[in-house]
Amino acid sequence: MSLYAIGDLHLSFGSGKPMDVFGPAWENHAQRLKDGFSALGPDDVCVICGDLTWAMSLEEAAEDFRFIDSLNGRKIILKGNHDYWWSTASKAKAFFKREGLTTIDILHNNCFHYEGAALCGSRGWLCDSGAADGHDRKIYDRELLRLEASLKAAGNGPDGLRRLCFMHYPPKYGGCECREVIDLLHKYRVELCCYGHLHGPVQKQAFNGRYEGIEYRLVAADFVDFKPIKII
Ligand SMILES: [Fe+2]
Ligand SMILES: [Fe+2]
């Protein structure tokens, strides 16, 4: 059994928004994702860090979720900024049940356990929003509550419980960082944080590596050549 992560599938089977317009890096990306997931076995788990589909509603997303369900392994998904189909986690769960999609779980104010590791996370928000007022600050504060709810859900656990975090937005990017997010990761002794959201040229400013003792990894699909990255 292995644990993987990838972000930003940006599927569009039902919404007619082909990704080829974003350049050759995205050509034939659904097939490349399928090939990438072929490395996983049925007992493997892959966390998908948001931006799953361009669809604006669950109904429009149905074909994309059928595709995700057909990929090897169990998938744990979280919300990205483009996931407009998302209204509530319970509506999405009911939709998956109705559609017979049995390999997709939702990470939202909760956590999953995998082989001695707690899988926690939340979407997050823009890096400099900690310093912002108004709307951005409100969303950021709500995301901090969600992230802490997820980290708390892991409980104290047995000694040696590893805590892994999955976000859509980078906690650290270019010259700025989400200080309160990073502080929460420290508070709950998170050792690794995977994130997505960054595409194309801005990936040059992505932070990959260790910072204050926590490992950060960008797993956006176009950054990892559409192959889920093995975490454990
Ligand atoms: Fe995004
Ligand atoms: Fe994205």
Image: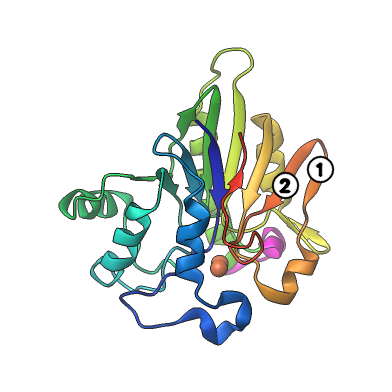
- Secondary structure category for the residue under label 1: strand
Name the image quarter holding residue 182.
Answer: top right
**Badge 1 amino acid:** Arg
Q: Are marks 2 and 1 in contact (CB under 8 Å)?
A: yes
Name the image quarter holding residue 88.
Answer: bottom left
Q: Residue at x 62, y 67 (%)?
A: 222
Q: Quadrant of the C terminus?
A: top right
Type of colouring: rainbow
Q: Is residue 50 visible?
A: no
Relative placement, left or right, of 223 versus 109 is right
Please give the range of residues in magenta: 127-134
Q: Residue at x 69, y 61 (%)?
A: 127
**Badge 2 amino acid:** Tyr
Q: Position of residue 179 (x, y in %)?
A: 74, 49
The reply to whether the magenta stretch includes residue 189 is no
Answer few, some or many: residues within 10 Å of disc 2's Cα (few below 14, many 20 plus, some between 14 and 19): many
- Secondary structure category for the residue under label 2: strand
Q: Which mark is residue 122?
A: none
Q: Position of residue 1 (x, y in %)?
A: 50, 30
Q: Position of residue 110 (x, y in %)?
A: 43, 37
Answer few, some or many: residues within 10 Å of disc 1's Cα (few below 14, many 20 plus, some between 14 and 19): few
Which residue is situated farthest in the top direction here?
A: 159
Per the image, the residue denoted by label 1 is: 210
Relative placement, left or right, of 135 versus 130 is left
Q: Residue at x 45, y 59 (%)?
A: 34
Per the image, the residue denoted by label 2 is: 216
Q: Nearer the viewer, residue 1 or 143?
A: 1
